[in-house]
Image (cartoon, helix red, strand yellow):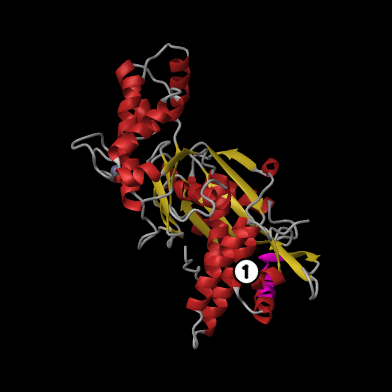
Amino acid sequence: MTFAKNSKRSADFARRATVATSSQRRPGRPRLVKQVNQRQVFDAVLELGSVSRAHLTRLTGISMPTASKTVARLLKLGLIEECGIVAPDGKGRPSRVYRTARGKSQVIGIAIEPHRCRVVRAGIDGQYDASAVISFPTPSTYSNLIDKTVAATQAFMTGQAKTLRIGISVPGNVDAAARLCLMAPNLHILDGRRPGFDIQNALGIETDIVHETLATCLAERSHGDARGVLNFVMIGTYEGFGMSAIVNGELLTGSHGLAGELGHTIVQADGELCGCGNRGCLETLATDLAFTRLVNRTAGVTLNISEICDAVRNKRLDATAELHTTLDYLATGIAAAINIFDPEIVALCSKMLDVTPGAFAHLKVRIIAKALRPMAQRCHVIRVEGDTLHGAVAAAIHHIVESLGPRMNWGG
Ligand SMILES: [Zn+2]
C-alpha cells in the first residue's frame, strides 16, 4: 500500500498550505481557525486519496495535537475513515492512515435529464458502482418525477451507510438558495418548481440542486481534466448554452447562484425568439439544437443531431455551411469566456463537433481568431463527455466540503 507521499500533488499541497496557514491563523478567531483546519485536512484527504496523520501534520503545518482533534471531528462527521497504519520513516511511532469514508457514509446523486433520470449512491470520494445506477424514463408530470426519484433514492438508503447529502442535476436555470428551478427550456415540468426542496421534504436529507453544466463542471474538477486547475470554464451546447466557471479555485456563483449565463447574450438583433423571452441570444445560434434547426430548415428535412451526423457521414447530406455558421457563433461565445476569465482550460460538451472530422479543429481556429491572442494561444480547449450523474454526486460533495469551512487562499 502506498500513500502518495512522494507525489507532486502532495508537494504542491504542502507548499500552498504553508503559505495559507501562516497568513490565516490569527489570535481571537478560534472558530475560524478550527473551520480552516478541518477544511484543510479534509481537502488533503480528498486530494491525495489517503494520508497518514504524521504526513498530514507535515503537509498542512498543523500541530500533531490539533491534527488529531481535527481528524477526530472528521471521523465523527462520517467524512473520513481509518484504512491502515503506516510504519514510521525513521524514529517515531507508526501513524494511522485515513481516507474518505466509503462504508459508513454516502451521498446520493440524481441526474434529471429531458428523456431519462438516473440515481446512484456514491462514497465521499465521489466514486460509485456504475452497474448499480437506477435509470428510468423521465415522467411526464412533476409529481410523478418527484415520486419516482424519491423511490429510487430510498432504495439506496436501506443499507448501513448514512446518507449525508443529495446532489441533483437539472437541465435548467437554478436559484440555488431557494432550490428553485427557474426555467428548464427542454423539460418544462420543472419550470418554477422546487425539486430540491420537495425531495428534501420527502426524505429529510439536505439537497443541492445545480444546473447540469455546473454539475459537469464540478465532475471535471473532482475527477476529470480540470482536477487541480485553478481557472477553468465548462461550456455545454447540447440544447441550451450553459456555462460554469472555476475562478482562482472558487466556483463562480454570483449574488444569486445564477452567474455564467453567457448564452443569453444577444448577438443577433431581431433573431430567433429565445426561451428567456429575448431574441437572438447566443443560445438560439450556437447550440446543437440551433444547428439542427438550421439544417432542417435549409434542407427541408426533420432530422435530429444523430441522424444529421449519419446523413453527413453517408454523404446523403452536406451540412458544412450550417455547421460553420453555428460553430462561428459558438467560437464567439467561447472567445468571450476566454477574454473574461483567462482560463487554463475550456472544456466543451457538444455533439455537433461529431458532424465532420474537422469540426473541432475548425472551431479552434475560429476561437483563436476571435479571442485576444495572448489568452487564446495559452488556453486549452478540450472536448469532454459531460457526465451529469457524476456531476450530481460532485455537487453534493462540493457542498459538504464548503460547509466545513473556508478554503485556503492558496499561494499559487
Ligand atoms: Zn436568451
In the image, taking residue 1 as reference, residue 194 lies left or right, namely left
Q: Confirm or reject: label 1 Cβ below 8 Å from ligand 1.
A: no
Is residue 291 positioned above or below 235 on the image? above
Within 10 angstroms of label 1, few (less than 14), some, or many (20 or more) residues?
A: many
Q: In terms of depth relative to the viewer, which is nearer, 399 or 371?
A: 371
Q: Which residue is mark 1?
A: 59
Image quarter of the N terminus: bottom right
The extreme front residue here reads 90
x, y percent for residue 99: 70, 62
Q: In terms of depth relative to the viewer, which is nearer, 256 or 151?
A: 256
| The magenta segment | 71-81
Q: Is residue 77 magenta?
A: yes
In the image, taking residue 88 as reference, residue 67 lies left or right, namely left
x, y percent for residue 209: 49, 55
Residue 4, located in which quarter of the rendered image?
A: bottom right
In the image, taking residue 163 as reference, residue 411 lies left or right, namely left
Tell me the kind of residue under disc 1. Leu
x, y percent for residue 399: 53, 62
- The residue located at (40%, 32%) in the rendering is 288
Q: Is residue 281 magenta?
A: no
User: Which type of secondary structure does the marked residue at label 1 adopt?
Assistant: helix
- The residue located at (46%, 26%) in the rendering is 354
State whether residue 354 appears in this view.
Answer: yes
Residue 96, located in which quarter of the rendered image?
A: bottom right
x, y percent for residue 391: 54, 49
Is residue 4 positioned above or below 307 on the image? below
Q: In terms of depth relative to the viewer, which is nearer, 196 or 217?
A: 217
- The residue located at (47%, 53%) in the rendering is 210
Q: In terms of depth relative to the viewer, which is nearer, 31 or 400?
A: 31
State whether residue 275 appears in this view.
Answer: no
